[in-house]
Image: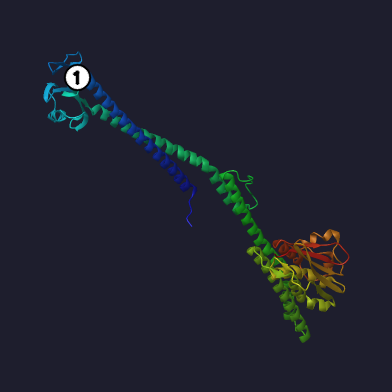
Amino acid sequence: MARIGLGGLRGRLSLAVVLVVALALAAMAAIFNVVLDNRLSADANSVLRSRATDELAALTIVDGKLHVRERPEDAALETRLWVFAGRSQVEGPARSPAAVQRAVVRLVGGASRRVELTAPDMRLLAVPVELRGARLGTVVAAISMEPYEQTRRTALIASLILCAGVLAVVLFMARWAVARALRPVSHMTAQAAKWSEADLDRRFSLGDPRDELTQLAATLDGLLERQSAAMRHEQRFSAEISHELRTPLAKIRAEAEIALRRRRTPAAYRDALATVLSSAERMSAVVDTLLVAARAEAEGGHRTCDAVRAAAVAADTCRELSAQRGVTLTVNGSDDPIKVAADEDVVERILFPLIENGCRYASGAVRVDVEEDGRHAVIHVVDDGPGVTPDEIRRIFQPGERGQAAGDGSPGAGLGLALARRLARQVGGEVMAEAAPGGRFTVELPRSD
């Protein structure tokens, strides 16, 4: 996936601004020059019409022939006006370029019209002289277009210089403005990178997104939160594994060291191997529980299962322990499935530590009741053991914490209840303890539609 640094982004934004302004300036310059060209052309035509009109006013007809009255300004106009009676020239400049003279002659006798010349750059206007519908002659006025062309060129060059200057200023201002606007982004990016390495608990905390910067802050906060959650999950997973596996590993090592230290009877070896096997099974159960918890947290989505069946499976896992201690273990539930929105392995791992604790500490009976309660399935694990004291209700769900009933040296490291509550909360449920005679734990799980 392509990545763009802030420097590249700054350059692209500046270039985009300059391109937009350049297009706008080019359009404005083009419109200005077109309007100016039309205006200059219209002015030249107006001057031509004025000269031709003045010359027509100076004409007189004597005996049916055209005559031109003398006027003070004739000296100034003599190089720009021709008067023809019929096809004979009555008045005109003393000297004129051959190309102009040929063009003037071609205009004689025709309708009123304009002609553009390129060498020299001139514009001609021919106007017929008529009296009572009869054609008497032609007046031709000329004007040099060189001053107008010079004005056009000057305006074009000036507009290009102006556009270039404006673009230079816009480029500088755009880079400055974009750099200033992106400075908080650069600072936030650097802060997020620093926090992700050294302090995952820091956040920008700018509130609800109101603009682009607060939206970026909210996004970075979300990324930091997810990274922090992943790091906490990894640390918790490692801590839980090391905490829970410490006891069975220590037993295995102790039994192995004792067995190797001196010769023992076959019965003693069998007892040692039984202890090793029991500890290995304990480790396997812990690893399975932690892996189920990690998988459920990573997958997010959940399948459905029958809560009664999951409770029966969890109880079957504890049958050997209940038989060893002479505890009666029963599961009571509906004949019809009670569907919950959780994987069967997850429900089993939620219930297993509760049932196992009941079998370990009960005096004679453990009962698992599965029932429906509105949008939830409720599972009660009840035993006739010492139960939980009021000050232990919250503490026993902390990793590594154990209740007073475990003070007799029974196995375990205080991980089961913490995992049970965490797994239940991952699927939208809860695990609760009650301070009542005997042990009483309640599991609530959301029902599946």
Which residue in the rendered view is the most extreme toward the bottom? 266
Which residue in the rendered view is the most extreme toward the front? 132
Rendered location of residue 59, percent (x, y): 18, 17
Task: Tell me if residue 291 comes above or below residue 198 in the rendering.
Answer: below
- In which quarter of the view is residue 420 placed? bottom right
| Residue annotated with mark 1 | 77
- In which quarter of the view is residue 320 placed? bottom right
Q: Residue at x 86, y 73 (%)?
A: 365
Rendered location of residue 396, percent (x, y): 79, 62
- In which quarter of the view is residue 347 placed? bottom right
Q: Nearer the viewer, residue 225 or 137?
A: 137
Q: Is residue 147 visible?
A: yes
Which residue in the rendered view is the most extreme toward the right? 437
Q: Nearer the viewer, residue 135 or 206?
A: 135
Say whether residue 94 is left or right of residue 277: left
Q: Residue at x 22, y 30 (%)?
A: 114
Say whether residue 398 is left or right of residue 42: right
Badge 1 amino acid: Leu
Q: Nearer the viewer, residue 413 or 297?
A: 297
Task: Tell me if residue 67 comes above or below residue 345 in the rendering.
Answer: above
Q: Is residue 94 visible?
A: no
Quarter holding the C terminus is bottom right
Rendered location of residue 274, percent (x, y): 75, 80
Task: Tell me if residue 234 comes above or below residue 20 in the rendering.
Answer: below
Which residue in the rendered view is the most extreme toward the left? 88
